[in-house]
Every structure is written in C-alpha cells, then in structure tokens.
Image: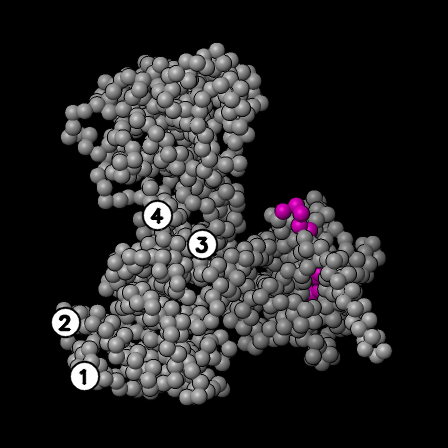
Amino acid sequence: MKKLVTLVCMLAVMLVNIEQLLAQDPNFHIYLSFGQSNMEGNAPIESQDTVNASDRFKVLQAVDCPELNREKGNWYTAVPPLCRCKTGLTLTYYFGRTLVEKLPDSITVGVINVAVGGCKIELFDKDIYKEYVKTAPDWMLNMINEYDGNPYGRLVEMAKLAQKDGVIKGILLHQGESNTGDTLWPKKVKKVYNNLLKDLGLNASKTPLLAGEMVHVNQGGICSSMNKIVATLPETIRNAYIVSSNGVPDAKDNLHFNAEGYRILGRRYAIKLMNVLREQANNPLGIRYAPKGFDTESQKIAKGRIDSILYNSKTVGVQRKALIYTPPGFTQSKRYPVLYLLHGIGGDEKEWYKNGAPAVILNNLYAEGKLEPMIVVMPNGRAMKNDRAEGNIFAEDKVAAFATFEKDLLNDLIPFVEKKFKVYKDKEHRAIAGLSMGGGQTLNFGLGNLDTFSWVGAFSSAPNTKIPEELLPNPEKAKELEVLWISCGDADGLMPFSKRTSDYLSKHDVPHIFYVEPGGHDFEVWKNDLYMFSQLLFKPVNESLLNKYSVLGLPASTNIRNAPYPQILPDKRVIFKTKAPDAKQLQIDLGKKYDMVKDDEGFWTVTTDSITEGFHYYSLIIDGLAVADPASESFYGMGRMASGIEIPFKGDDYYSLKNVPHGDIRINQYYSEASRSWREIYVYTPPGYDGSTEKYPVLYLLHGGGEDQRGWANQGKTNLILDNLIAENQANPMIIVMLDGNVSSGGLSGFNENSLKAFESELKQAAIPFVENKYRVKTDAESRALAGLSMGGLQTLYAGIQNTDMFSYLGVFSSGWFANNDELSGPQYAFMKEHTEKINDNLDRFFISMGGEEDIAYQNCQVMMEKFDEMGVEYEYSEYPGGHAWPVWRHDLYKFAQLLFK
C-alpha cells in the first residue's frame, strides 16, 4: 500500500511539472537584470521614453507601486520606471525595446529588474548578504527594505513566477562602481551567477551573462579603472560577455550615464545578446580556443610522465630515440590508444617537450575530464643515422629523411611501441599529428596509410605536403577516418598548403575540420592545436559539428588587396570587422541586417548566419547611411556602387580560374544613332579569336535592373564560364556581347513598352550593326542568341519574340511578364498568340529558368508559362535554387551556353 501511495504522489508531482511546462510559452523570452544605480536607472525619464510602448515588451513588477497601478508579481507593458517606483530611466528599458524591434513579431520579451543604488556585489550573495546589510547606510537600507531586505531573494522569487509564463534566456548585470579595485569581483559575480543557475534550474551554456562597463575613461569616468577587472569576467565565467561603454555619454558626476547614455548602452546590451545567441546557435561546441592557463602547470592535479625510449630501426640501421608520454594513473594492466606526435623541420624528438608543453596541456585536460587516456609518442621524424637538427637542416639528404621516416614509423616504431606497451593494435586506436614539416608528414603518412590511422591532425602543414591528387587519389577511402583535422594560423605564410588540401577534401565531400586560428607559424598556434585536437581523439565524433570549429575564417576573394576582413568561415558564416571609432551604429546588410558591436579600439564586428553560395551584394550601414565597404571590391548593382562578397561552395569550379585557354573581355565605345548617345559594351571573344579567320556566332547578353554592361563581366564571370565550357567541349566557341540595357533616363528601363521599344531600337539599329562591323561574326538568325536576367529577361521577351527572324535562341532568366499589369503584358500575349506557329518554327531553343520559389519573379513566370501552354508556345524550363541572385544567373548562363548554336 505504501508503494502505491508513493507512486500516486510521484505521478501527481509529474503531472504538476508537465502542467507547468505546458504553461510556458517558448516565445516569451525573459531576462533578469540586477546591479546598482546604473541598472536601476539614474537619469530622468523623458517623453521619448514613454511613447510607442509595445505590448510585446513586458516588465514583471518586483515591488508594489500603487501610484503606478502596478502590483508585485504581475506583468505590465514595459514603460519606465522598470525598477522601483521612483527610479529613473534604466538601460534595461532600451535593451528590451531594441529586442522587440529586431526579433520576429512572434517573440515577446519580458524583464525583471532588481537593483540597489550604491551597493556592492556582496548584497546579491545569498550566503553573506545579511552581514553586508548590517553595514549599509540608512539611505541604502530604505531601498533594500523594498525587497524585504533581500534583493537576491526577490529576484529569484520573481524569476520563478516568470518561469511559469516563459523561458529565461539571459542575465544582465551592471554593477562594479562600489567594488572598484576589487580583483576578487569576478569570482564574487560567478558565485551569484552560479546561485541563480542552481536556484532557477538554468543551464550555464544556454544562459549568457552580459556585464556592462563603468563610465569609460574617455568620458572621464571616476570608476573607469574597474573596467580592467570587468574585462576579466569571461575568464571566470565562460558564458559571460562584456558590453563596452566607450563613447556612451555620461552625467555630470562622471559616475552615472545620462538618458541618452542609457539608451545607447541598452541597445548595446541587446545587440551583444543577439550576436551571442547567433554565435551560440552556430557554434554548439562552446569553446573553440584554448582558455588562459591551459598550458600552465597546476600542482593540485595528477600528472602523467614523459620518458625516453630506444628502438631498433631496420629502416635506418641504428637505434633511434623517441619520447613517450604516459597518462596519469597509467598501468600496464590496461590497454591504451596511441597518438604519434611529430615535430617540425628544425626540431627533433624533444621539440614538443621543450616548446609545446604537451604533458602540461594533457594533464590539465585529464584533470577536467576532457580527454580519453592515451599514450603519446614523440619520435624523431628525420630518419637518418645522424638525425640531429644541426648544420643545414634544409640539405637534400635531411629533407629526404623526413620522407624515409614513413617506413621507420610503420615498420619499426609502431611495432616496437605495440610490443613494449599494452596498447591497442587497430587503426581505430591510432592517431597521428604534427606541426609544420611534421604536419606535412602527418597528411602524407596518415592519408597514405588509411588502414593504419583513423585520426589525423595536421598543424600548419609545410611544403612537403603532397599535392591533393597525389595525397588522396581515392577520396572516398578517406571518409573512413574518424577525424581529419587541418589547421593553420591566419598569419602563417604556409596557409595555401592547408587551404588547397581542405578545398580538395570539400570538393570530394570528405568530412574534415579546417581550423583557422589567430597567429603565425609558432608554438602559440600549435599548443592550441594540440589542446583542441586531442579532445576529439578516441571517442565518438558528431560529424555535423566539424565545420563549427574554426575561430577565424579566410579573407573573401572579393576583398581588396591584403584586407583581412570580411572573412568566410568553413560553415559559410561571414565575419565583418570595420574601424569607425566615431560612429554610433554600424550594420551589415547582407540579405538581412546584422548589428555590429564596437570595441574599445573603435572596431565594429559581427558574425552573420551562414550565407548561400556565390556572389552577393551587401552594404555597410553607418548611422543609417548605406555605403560600400572599403574592405571589399565594389560593383555596380542596386542602382549604385555596392560591395560584393563571393561565398565559395562545392561545385563552383565551373566558373573558377583554371589552367585552360582563355578568351578576352574587350571594352568598346560606340555612338548610337538610335539613342543619340555614346554607349559602351563589353565583348567576350573566345580563346584563339585573334589567331583565326573564322566567323563566330553571337550571344547578346543582358543585365538586370540597377546594373549595367559590367554586370555579366564582373559579377557574372561570363569569361570564366565560357573558357571552361569551351575547354571541356561542352559549348561551341562564341562571342558574347554584354550590352547596357539602360536606354532611358532614371536607369530603370524595361518596365514599360516605351522603354522596351527603345531597347529594341538600340539593339537592332546600333548594337548589332556595330558588333557585326567590328567583329568576325556570323549574321544569320541561326547564329544569334539573346538572353537576359530580370529586367534583361523582359527585354529578351520583347525584342526576342518580336524578332524571331533575327534570333534563334532566347534565354529568359528570373523574369516573366507581369501577372498584375495587363496593360503591358496583354499586348505581348496577344502578339504571341497570333504568331505562335512562327515563334515555334523560328526558335531552336526558348529557355526559361528561375531561382526557385524564393525568386521574386517566380509567380510572374509561372503565370506566364501557363499562358504559353494555353497558346502552344514551345519552351523548356529549368530551376536552380537561390532566389533572385547572381549564383542563379551564373548557373543559368552555364546551362544555356551549352544549348547554343548546335
């Protein structure tokens, strides 16, 4: 009977918990904010702070305020004051306002603000707050008493109420003025943070703590020295982030911010939070770089041991030395996996020991429970009788000895280790890693012996690394590896060797980590590599996380010369960094707007979501003004010069620069009698044009709205697409004429019949005659094609369909007659209906393509094709996902060019 009662009670508790979970709204995001006077709000509330209140922004009242008609424990639309009844404007208010402005309409934001002016952090320590309160002055006691003498307790009480309605997403802190100079402040904050996590059942990895700086030294802040201590908080709390006060205006006392300062600081908290959450969503690993002290010896932990070993090398004909690390608690009664760790060209078996602190790094990782017990063997990778790193280390025989070491490793060293020590003897329990020359050996030996190693880690691989096709002639086999790690410092001149290997692996879908980190060719980089790589060894690996590791990305190919940013990460997120010390707000507009965060040096940074393949326009928005980013090449698009960024992807080799014969792009000016103006065209001539006498067919290729004749040459990579197709015999050699389709004032021609007629006249009366007079081209309809994207697609539909006696091939990319504009579209359909038979007879190919349902012209095109079907107009249709963008149009040209003149 007792068991039954117990079971009933357990079920009752479970039902209550389920009821509470069901009551939570996951779209109600709640934030706790606490601290002292700058958090409670010390500036007067102005009229702009009380208007346009959103019912998506709520405050949970922490004290009774009859004069405000608010009761403790109830939610209200957030209007300041948000702390106690008579406090001022708080940064928390503009934190919440900014979030609801930027988050989807489905998200509601709630805040709980508990703060006490003048208090130390000790007031929020639930174990010692009573002692602190005993020493508090009367003016502070009055504020503390509004929380029944326990501000921390009130914060937790309100937070538990809030958890019935929504989900706590983060914690805001602004406190430290009263602890200025207290170097223990970070540890004290950590205790409060940990107590909140425990008391509220929160997960540390999912609950960021945002801490703001005191009034900055640049504003004359009297507590600005505390900012150096605040800056160390992330070293104590992994999920803590600092919000800069640099440039935030303050009050006359140089202690508090003024009203505008709270508005700015609140927005910074919100932007910091959104960037942190985006980063965490894209990086579920948590730490991606070794923390401070990872290579510092600790006296309080168990330690492994490093010893020397001697083994007989039949390969070299002598006994050879190696170092061996055995982990803490090593015993011969247990089997261990083995990592073979290789040095660089100027080192020997002691190089890691002298410079890389491997025992210290591994011991610390064991103490933290992050490492599988393993033996680490550090051999001499120079397999020759005199294997010392002396004399000319680049001498031919010494360099050759590094290649000879493969036989020594496989035939002598590994058998010795497996006989001398109790270790596993299968490939699943063998790893190989190395730095520089040893990194090249690692790739050469590891990928060359996939039946011997399952874990391969190449750090800053040197020029001895084989070219990818020799390194891995059968890429499919490498997919059997457990982990393939390739890393390099961003300032390392050997980066090209790592990148070319990673590019080859990506092209062949071989899972691997390409880890780019800050630094050059030195042990600061390699120690971090050992720290990161060793944690992956001999345990299950989540393949979906492999492209989440990189700390930095590589500069985009569209960057101006030597510009380090923007950087593209392996998962196609982009890091932007711009210096603008006097700006108040910076954003990147790349499909969507990303708020950038400013540091004390005036640098603004942000990491975007993953960006789709190919070329994209983007803008840098400085205080509301959209401009071209000076770090990137600019392109004429969007009706102005705009920045562009190229996102590499698997399959982009059809427009990559290859070792094939290349044609030319020529720029010509001509006077047009049709438009009574000088005009410019870009002309692609195929490889061998100048050396031949033959005549070529012509494709007249049109850009979209807001672009001009430069679009297909620069953004479209027309020359590279055709060079590669012609070299592969997939397209006939042809001339491509890239016209300026802007033939009327305003630059947005093509959207009314007059503009379309003007373009038709320009094409027939000026452009084609000029081309046929200047270039060796065929002049029959079978040798002419017309194609265009978006606006150029409409021009193709008009001029091409009206003149099928001149063109046998039409290509319409991301375009279609307007479904809601019968005045324009109706006459076109009427013409086509009357001339359907002629159109079908004259056109060899009528190619229509779209960028999928996300293409802004998609619906117009679907309606148009239904009309074509009703009339019996023959066409072929293609889709390539990507929307209304250059990646789609490049692919359209790639497909269309293969259909022409055959």
Question: x%, y% of residue 714?
Answer: 34, 36
Labelled disc at residue 318: 1
Q: Tell me if label 2 and label 1 are in contact, CB under 8 Å.
A: no
Q: Is residue 251 left or right of residue 842?
A: right
Q: Which residue is mark 3?
A: 571
Q: Please report whichever mark, 3 or 1, sits nearer to the chain's N-terminal start.
A: 1
Label 3 to label 2, Cα distance in Å? 42 Å
Tell me the kind of residue under disc 3.
Asp
In the rendered image, the quadrant that contains the N terminus is: bottom right
- Give the label, 2 or 1, closer to the camera: 1
Q: Is residue 115 visible?
A: yes
Q: Residue furthest top?
A: 834
Give SS at disc 3: loop
Q: Is residue 475 above or below residue 393?
A: above
- Give the label, 4 or 2, closer to the camera: 2
Give SS at disc 2: helix
- Give the label, 4 or 1, closer to the camera: 1
Labelled disc at residue 557: 4
Q: Please report whichever mark, 4 or 3, sits nearer to the chain's N-terminal start.
A: 4
Label 4 to label 3, Cα distance in Å? 16 Å
- Give the label, 4 or 3, closer to the camera: 3
Tell me the kind of residue under disc 4.
Ser
In the rendered image, the quadrant that contains the C terminus is: top left
Label 3 to label 1, Cα distance in Å? 48 Å
Tell me the kind of residue under disc 2.
Asp
In magenta, the rendered stretch is 104-118
Q: Residue at x 50, y 60 (%)?
A: 283
Labelled disc at residue 397: 2
